[in-house]
Image (cartoon, coloured by chain):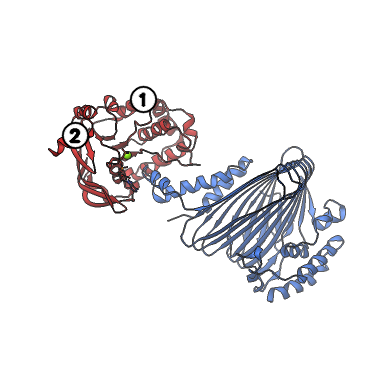
Chain colours: A red, B blue
Amino acid sequence: MLKITNLHASVEGNSILKGINLEVKAGETHAIMGPNGSGKSTLAQVLAGHDDYEVDKGEVSYLGKDLLEMDVDERACEGVFLAFQYPVELPGVNNTYFLKSALNAQRKYRGESEIDAMEFMDLIGDKIKLLNLKDSLLKRPVNEGFSGGEKKRNEIFQMAVLEPKLALLDETDSGLDIDALRIVAGGVNAMRSKDNATIIVTHYQRLLNYIVPDYVHVLVDGKIISSGDKALALELEEKGYDKIIEESKA
Amino acid sequence: MKALDNFKADFENTLQLSKGLIKEIRSKAFEKFISEKFPTRRDEYWKYSDPSSILKLDLNYNDSGDFKDDSYDIILSNGRIVKTISKFKTGNISDGLDNGDVPKEIFKEEKNPFLNLNNAFAVNGCYLILDSKTKKDVKILNVINNNSDCQAVYPKLVIIAKKNSDSTVFEEVKVVGEGINFVNSVVDIILEDGANLEHIILDDYAKDTYSISNICVKQSKDSNFRSHNFSMGKKLARRDYNIELLGTGANCDLYGLYFVDGENHIDHHTTVEHKKEHCTSNEHYKGILSGKSVGVFNGRIHVHPKAQKTDAIQNNQNLLLTDDAIIHTKPELEIYADDVKCTHGATVGQLDEKALFYLRTRGLNQKEAQGLLMRAYVGEIIDHISNGEIRTRMMNIVLDRLPKGD
Ligand SMILES: Nc1ncnc2c1ncn2[C@@H]1O[C@H](COP(=O)(O)OP(=O)(O)OP(=O)(O)O)[C@@H](O)[C@H]1O
Ligand SMILES: [Mg+2]
């Protein structure tokens, strides 16, 4: 589904991604771990199409197409979804209206008709239940004044409504309390299928107990220095990054 | 100058149309207008808007033309009343002066030349008395009906909100026909003790129109004035609000939204005179500028020595959609009382890039994302309209007129 080859990216002349190789197949869940500032969010933003980041080298093919050639919204309509590490507040933009506009934009792209109000309410009703979201959050401006945890939950709620093929979750677990973590993980798991894939960026092994990854990658200084299965996350937790970095050099 | 000669000729030709009190008012006003210098950009007050461009026009007074539309209670065509409804106490200003409905003190000599000029041409004009304690809505249409190529029109409206009355006045300006218009309009509003008035004014698009509009409001004790101003840039568009808080406990809310595009121009000068204690004013203006347009916002708050416990807020936000658009925004605070709360702020910016990116990652294209953010931006002003029907209508009109972005 996604094939990243030798990806280099920089921001304002500073090279951040220094040769990423990663292949993700439909049905798989990958976890990316790594120290602060190693480039995890940069990778997610580059995949989503943020133009602050310059792609200097490398290729990204997504469902057989050149992802880097697509506009931001085109990527979204093709099924790429980024749950932001820091979701953006949109004052004055009603959350429900926003979500409906987004869904309709994607449906239009796929040549489907606009969803009518009743159908939409039914759809979000189900997803609200799935994520145990407070109704009142839907009536408020997007993310404005939401607590940290509410923002993260709102990201996954959007994902549940938009049903992407490739979900990039950037530290969705940070800021969630224990119950919320379980609920959000449950939501993500409920959406997993053989046709879609998930890339989870996290600092905590704990999340991976709930969303069990097929692969774990360690990203350090813009490169994946080690890959393995879920056991790698446990090893990381035990040894810390320094040890893993040392071993990778050996 | 062409226009000045035409003003003189038109004034003399139309003076015999007036009788009674209005005739004297007109004469005095014209004398005053002529005796003073016509403003230029050298005047601080006109620094960014050049009224002398009007003087180059070959203007002719025109108050002819008819217009019909069932959805309005009162219609003025080129300033002349062509429809009223018996539900409201209303009529020609000249008659109102003679029968005592309209106090003649409203028409004093003014500093602002365009107030004098409008008074000088008060051939027509309409007054409206609002005296109902149960909420009444009045819809007024101000048609600028161009059938003479290059015309000068002087719409004039006097609104008197009686003691403890409660009303909404919706005033729409519509430009029909082709040609150049100089529209010098004045709305005089008086709020008696405890009166509650919501005044909504909606401008039309109009190319080749020079519009100078003054809205003068006098508020007595405990009165409450809510203003919503939706204005559109033109060759020259200037609107001044002059609010006088003359009684204790008076409150005004001034909301404004202006759009200007192309090479058009828009200028708002607002003044709130806090003359008595315990009054509040709350002003929030937002602009959207595109193309090579120019916008001006000058918000003056004048707190007089007696006006202790004044609470005044002023805020002006501007969205510049292009690099070539220009906004001059300036607060002007003069505070002569010490126990006063007064805050002001102005911002100039573009649509939030982070927000645009976020929206696009959800599938909205650039245009749709811009549209959504602009809708939110204008919504913060429109949402203050208390009348739901008008609010919805304004939202639709505004969405329709939003610059479409790129
Ligand atoms: N827009 C930007 N401008 C300047 N520097 C940037 C920008 N975005 C990222 N960087 C820098 O790139 C590096 C990688 O940042 P990134 O956000 O990708 O790290 P991360 O791995 O997600 O870290 P964390 O675990 O703290 O979230 C950091 O040094 C960061 O300061
Ligand atoms: Mg990060």
Q: Position of residue B178 (x, y in %)?
A: 60, 66
Quadrant (top left, top right, bottom left, bottom right) of the N terminus of chain B? bottom right
Q: Where is residue A32 in the image (x, y as percent from the top left)?
A: 25, 35
**Label 2 crowd bin: few (<14), some (14–19), many (20+), radius 10 Å:** some
Amino acid type at circle 2 is Ile
**Label 1 crowd bin: few (<14), some (14–19), many (20+), radius 10 Å:** some
Q: Which residue is drawn at 32% across and 50% down?
A: A71
Q: Which residue is drawn at 82% across and 58% down?
A: B94
Dividing the picture into quadrants, the one containing residue A123 is top left
Residue B249 visible at all? yes
Amino acid type at circle 1 is Ile
Q: Outermost residue, top direction?
A: A179
Ligand 1 occupies quarter: top left
Apparent side of residue A20 relative to residue B84 in the rendered image (left or right): left
Apparent side of residue A129 relative to residue A48 in the rendered image (left or right): right
Q: Which residue is drawn at 69% across and 67% down?
A: B152
Q: Mark 1 lies on which chain?
A: A
Q: Position of residue B190 (x, y in %)?
A: 77, 49
Residue underneath mark 2: A244
Of B152 and A54, which appears nearest the observer? A54
Of B146 and B158, which appears nearest the observer? B158
Quadrant (top left, top right, bottom left, bottom right) of the C terminus of chain B? bottom left
Badge 1 element: helix
Query: How many numbered marks, from 0 up?
Result: 2
Residue underneath mark 1: A183
Q: From the viewer's perspective, is residue A194 above or below residue B213?
A: above
Ligand 1 neighbours mark 2 (CB distance < 8 Å): no
Q: Outermost residue, left direction?
A: A250
Badge 2 element: helix
Of A163 and B351, which appears nearest the observer? B351
Q: Position of residue B35 (x, y in %)?
A: 77, 71
